[in-house]
Amino acid sequence: MKPELATAFNKEMTDARMAWTARDLSTCFRSLERAHILGQRNLWPHILTHGWMLRVGWARCDYREVVGQILRLIATLPGALFGWVPEGNTGGANVSALKPMPVPDEFKPYFAKNSMLKGMLLRVLIISVIMVLMI
Ligand SMILES: [Fe+2]
């Protein structure tokens, strides 16, 4: 994760944790959605945001969210390997996990330099290494 993207992601996660501490679950979830947009191309930040969304869903007794987040947590690894990362997706169970969504204007600079080809080549390399290790 590039440093400027990591800084923006960490700010949203800090905001989410502060809202969690204040028991403001709506604000917490909104910050997690913003963190998801920023972090979903990186495996650990992606897992972290869905884990926190699961926690918020559980605290709200929102079992649709809980089930949705468990499914999204399971999908993070194949998503990272195969590039199933819809740009701008907010990550909540209220939207399809495969639906691209508009990226907020303030986040657009973080995605301007993204190279789809570079990402695909990296994934092919990772899958190749895994296949070689399995032989
Ligand atoms: Fe996600």
Image (tube, rainbow, N blue to C red):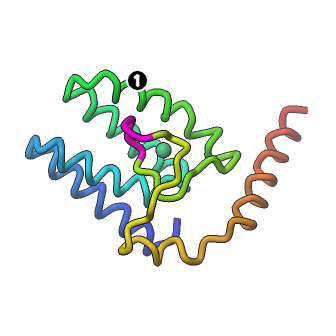
Q: Residue pushed farthest left?
A: 22
Q: Residue pushed farthest right?
A: 135
Give the camera-side residue of 130 and 120: 120
Q: Residue at x 52, y 71 (%)?
A: 111
Give the camera-side residue of 130 and 5: 5
Image height of 107 relative to 77, above or below: below
* Horizontal arrangement in the rendering, residue 26 relative to residue 57 (left or right): left
The image quadrant of residue 5 is: bottom left
Amino acid, disc 1:
Val
Q: Residue at x 34, y 29 (%)?
A: 65
Give the camera-side residue of 87 and 10: 87
Main SS category, magenta section: loop
The magenta segment is 91-95
Image location of residue 81, percent across then percent down: 68, 46
Q: Residue at x 25, y 57 (%)?
A: 14
**Ligand 1 closer than 8 Å to label 1 CB:** no
Q: Is residue 88 magenta?
A: no
Q: Which residue is mark 1?
A: 67
Image location of residue 38, percent across then percent down: 44, 60
Image location of residue 132, percent across then percent down: 88, 41
Image height of 66 relative to 75, above or below: above
Image location of residue 92, percent across then percent down: 37, 41
Q: Residue at x 34, y 57 (%)?
A: 34
* Horizontal arrangement in the rendering, residue 44 relative to residue 16 (left or right): right
Kind of element beneath mark 1: helix
Crowding near pointer 1: few (<14 within 10 Å), some, many (20+)? some
Total number of numbered labels? 1
